[in-house]
Amino acid sequence: MDFPLKAAIELTAAQARVRAMTAEEMLELIRGLNARLGDVRPKAGPPVDAAPLDPRKAVREKSIVCLESGRPFRVLTRRHLAKYGLTPEQYRAKWGYPADTPLVCKALQRERRKKMREMKLWEKRGK
């Protein structure tokens, strides 16, 4: 069930608990609320008048904002970038990131670095 219809039913049920309503009144209220709530729902995608995000500010502590979609992620995956016809290498080049920049948030980058240091993969393992 989509959001406007579910919200309209819940609002009508709350109204029916407060005052006596006929079945026709409830149906009319549900139809009216569903139509009005459907009009209020925001359209998909980033706002048209929004200024593009600065690539230097896109990499944050707990998220990295995709400059193509405007949505925040912890990791910009190859699969997400493919929706926009880009590989990670093309994305970095398009937005001016160095080729070795990981497309992950700072916290996850730090966590991975710490784990690699603990594993010490560069040392030979003893018997």
Image: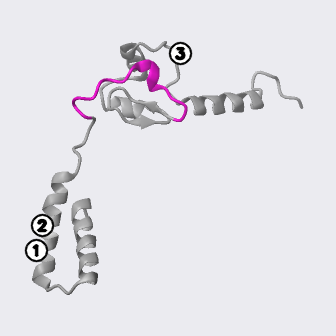
The residue that mark 2 highlights is 32
The alpha-carbon separation of the residues under discs 3 and 1 comes to 60 Å
| Residue sitting at x 59%, y 33% | 108
| Rendered position, 18 above or below 1 | below
Quarter of the picture holding the C terminus? top right
Highlighted range, magenta: 47-62
Quarter of the picture holding the N terminus? bottom left
Residue 26: x percent and y percent? Answer: 16, 78
Say what secondary structure mark 2 lies in: helix
Q: Is residue 91 left or right of residue 100?
A: left
In the rendered structure, does residue 27 fall within the stretch colored magenta? no
> Is label 2 or label 3 in front?
2
Marks 3,1: beta carbons within 8 A = no
Marks 1,2: beta carbons within 8 A = yes
Q: Is residue 73 left or right of residue 22?
A: right
In the rendered structure, does residue 57 fall within the stretch colored magenta? yes
Q: Amino acid at mark 2?
A: Gly
Residue placed farthest to the right in the image?
127
Q: Can residue 76 be seen here?
A: no
Residue closest to the eye, 35 or 90:
35
> Disc 2 or 3, which lies upstream in sequence?
2
The mark total stands at: 3
**What label sits on residue 28 in the rendered view?**
1
Residue closest to the eye, 105 or 13:
13
